[in-house]
């Protein structure tokens, strides 16, 4: 009975996670700015609170990317298969 070695994932080095964190931070800033916007600021944008809606959209996008990373992690090939192939 062969035991399967645990698969290594990219973890924190996955570019999708970095993108998710950046979108989350920018989305959080825009959401706070939109939530605290004055009526004058909203009037400048034709009556639409663009900061709030853009921030919420970025937060949803960040959560989607984070779920993608969690549900479909990148598997990093171990070096032993490459070394054994180079020896032969």
Image (spheres, helix red, strand yellow):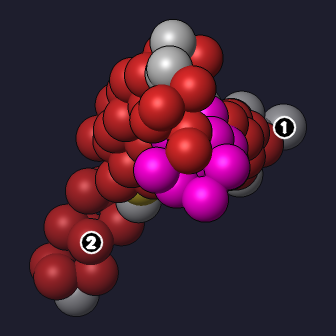
Q: Residue furthest bottom?
A: 88
User: Magenta span has 55?
Assistant: no
How crowded pointer 1 is (Cα within 10 Å; few <14, some 14-19, many 20+) is rated as few
- Relative vertical location of residue 32 with respect to residue 74 in this rendering, above or below: above
Instruction: Tell me which label, 2 or 1, sits earlier in the chain.
Output: 1
Look at the image and tell me whether residue 65 can be seen.
no
- Relative vertical location of residue 49 with respect to residue 47 in this rendering, above or below: above
Foreground residue, 51 or 42? Answer: 42
User: Magenta span has 53?
Assistant: yes
Foreground residue, 34 or 5? Answer: 34
Contact between labelled residues 1 and 2, with CB atoms less than 8 Å apart: no
- Residue 12, x across and y down, in percent: 35, 31
Q: Residue furthest right?
A: 1
Quadrant containing the N terminus is top right
Residue bearing the label numbered 2: 82
- Residue 55, x across and y down, in percent: 56, 38
Magenta extent: 44-54
- Relative vertical location of residue 11 with respect to residue 33 in this rendering, above or below: below
- What residue is at 37 percent from the left and 35 percent from the top? 26
Foreground residue, 76 or 66? Answer: 66
- Residue 25, x across and y down, in percent: 38, 27
Mark 2 or mark 1: which is in front?
A: 2
- Residue 77, x across and y down, in percent: 41, 59
Foreground residue, 43 or 64? Answer: 43
- What residue is at 67 percent from the left and 49 percent from the top? 47
Dot 2: element: helix
Cα separation between marks 2 and 1: 24 Å
- When asked about the image quadrant of residue 76, the answer is bottom left
Residue bearing the label numbered 1: 1
Look at the image and tell me whether residue 42 can be seen.
yes
């Amino acid at each position: 009975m062969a035991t399967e070695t645990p698969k290594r994932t990219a973890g924190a080095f996955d570019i999708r996670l970095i993108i998710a964190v950046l979108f989350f931070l920018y989305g959080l800033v825009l959401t706070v700015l939109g939530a605290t916007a004055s009526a004058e600021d909203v009037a400048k944008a034709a009556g639409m609170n663009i900061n709030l809606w853009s921030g919420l959209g970025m937060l949803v996008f960040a959560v989607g990317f984070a779920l993608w990373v969690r549900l479909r992690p990148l598997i990093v090939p171990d070096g032993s298969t490459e070394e054994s192939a180079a020896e032969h």
